Image (cartoon, helix red, strand yellow):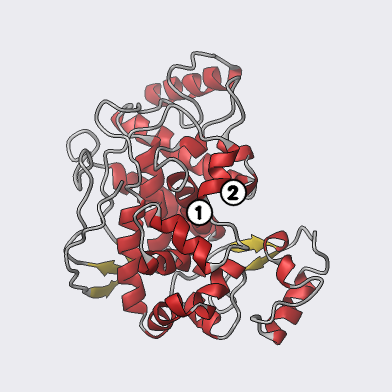
């Protein structure tokens, strides 16, 4: 588990070229990870990812939320080992088929594997899919206006995916109350401030109606603003509507603190969101983030670094996958593998 002992933080916010950098004393990192892990083996790693994501997110800003969510769903279930990227096999269904993961963006998986191909073309099989996913999540925050921070690296990829029950037991459902949220995160060494800060990831992205229509039908949740509820009913006219809505009504494509302003105005989308303001244990934290964006950024960075180290595999554990969707020991060769090898050969020649 990640250490819960953190050095005191000194926050400095510098705005340059629309990017916000947080410079502070870093949290402790677990054994096996390093702030400069690929300095020799793949020094261009982060520039490869940033350059590619700049284009991807410019073309479709929604992919930022997708990549950030992918990192969350990976780390909370058996640790940050990229097990959520694995396809199913004869050993059982993959994590992707578990109910909480059915709404993960298919494009997010493709983006991660595209990044993996580009990195391997430059550095060989040196970088894990787990580390690629962690950096992509950080860059998704930065490229939508949020804080930049260093990511400790050196994770290995897991050899097995989690069961559906493990996925259900470890992810926080949208209908969960604050007690469930705090208990789930406390079990992973994350405190109330981490819980509220990490929930701020909902400041970007969209949600399917089915994740919150229990708050609209048959009776409206009393903690929901009436005008907000009526607008949601127009977007989601039935409990099983396939439509989607923005998670943050004020600035849905910008990583800022408006999510907390939403909560103070009873405009949180999920029960797990709004209850953070309703519950006296977390209300003060929500308020402090709503009035102080720099404080939110500081605490979000701490939470992300802590979460990104949950049960990581390092050293001789796990592997560095040649493909993010399958283990190296899976020697099954299909047409997709052959096509990829041919493409890489031609790329090398020309």
Q: Residue at x 34, y 71 (%)?
A: 297
Instruction: Work out whether residue 136 can be spotted.
Output: yes
Q: Residue at x 22, y 41 (%)?
A: 43
- State if disc 2 and disc 1 touch (CB < 8 Å): yes
Q: Position of residue 287 (x, y in %)?
A: 43, 83
Q: Residue at x 51, y 35 (%)?
A: 162
Position of residue 298 in the picture relative to residue 200 (left or right)? left
Residue that carries the numbered disc 2 in the rendered image: 104
Report the front residue among 247 and 278: 278
Numbered disc 2: secondary structure? loop
Position of residue 214 in the picture relative to residue 283 (left or right)? right
Instruction: Give the quadrant of residue 334.
Output: top right
Report the front residue among 126 and 29: 29
Instruction: Work out whether residue 18 can be spotted.
Output: no
Q: On residue 231, which mark appears? A: none
Position of residue 223 in the picture relative to residue 326 (left or right)? right
Q: Position of residue 147 (x, y in %)?
A: 33, 67
> Where's the C terminus, which quadrant?
top left
Residue that carries the numbered disc 1 in the rendered image: 69
Mark 2 closeness class: few <14, some 14–19, many ≥20 residues within 10 Å:
some
Position of residue 226 in the picture relative to residue 26 (left or right)? right
Q: Residue at x 83, y 65 (%)?
A: 238
Q: Position of residue 151 (x, y in %)?
A: 28, 51
């Amino acid at each position: 588990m990640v250490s819960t002992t953190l050095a005191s933080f000194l926050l400095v916010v510098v705005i340059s070229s629309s990017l916000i950098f947080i410079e502070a004393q870093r949290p402790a990192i677990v054994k096996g990870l390093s702030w400069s892990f690929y300095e020799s083996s793949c020094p261009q790693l982060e520039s490869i990812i940033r350059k590619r994501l700049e284009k991807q997110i410019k073309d479709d800003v929604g992919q930022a939320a997708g990549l950030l969510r992918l990192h969350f769903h990976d780390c909370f279930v058996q640790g940050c080992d990229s097990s959520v990227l694995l396809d199913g096999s004869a050993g059982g269904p993959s994590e992707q088929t578990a109910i909480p993961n059915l709404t993960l963006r298919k494009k997010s998986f493709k983006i991660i594997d595209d990044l993996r191909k580009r990195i391997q073309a430059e550095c060989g099989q040196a970088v894990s899919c787990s580390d690629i996913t962690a950096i992509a999540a950080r860059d998704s925050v930065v490229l939508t206006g949020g804080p930049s921070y260093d990511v400790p690296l050196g994770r290995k990829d897991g050899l097995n995916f989690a069961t559906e029950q493990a996925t259900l037991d470890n992810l926080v459902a949208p209908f969960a109350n604050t007690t469930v949220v705090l208990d789930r995160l406390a079990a992973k060494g994350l405190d109330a401030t981490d819980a509220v800060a990490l929930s701020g990831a909902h400041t970007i992205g969209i949600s399917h109606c089915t994740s919150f229509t229990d708050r609209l039908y048959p009776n409206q949740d009393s903690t929901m603003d009436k005008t907000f509820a009526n607008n949601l009913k127009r977007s989601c006219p039935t409990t099983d509507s396939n439509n989607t809505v923005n998670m943050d009504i004020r600035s849905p494509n910008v990583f800022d603190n408006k999510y907390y302003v939403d909560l103070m105005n009873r405009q949180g989308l999920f029960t797990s969101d709004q209850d953070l303001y309703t519950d006296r244990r977390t209300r003060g934290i929500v308020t402090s983030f709503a009035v102080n964006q720099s404080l939110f950024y500081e605490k979000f960075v701490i939470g992300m670094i802590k979460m990104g180290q949950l049960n990581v595999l390092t050293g001789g554990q796990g592997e560095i996958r040649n493909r993010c969707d399958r283990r190296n020991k899976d020697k099954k060769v299909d047409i997709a593998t052959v096509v990829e090898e041919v493409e890489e050969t031609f790329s090398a020649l020309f």
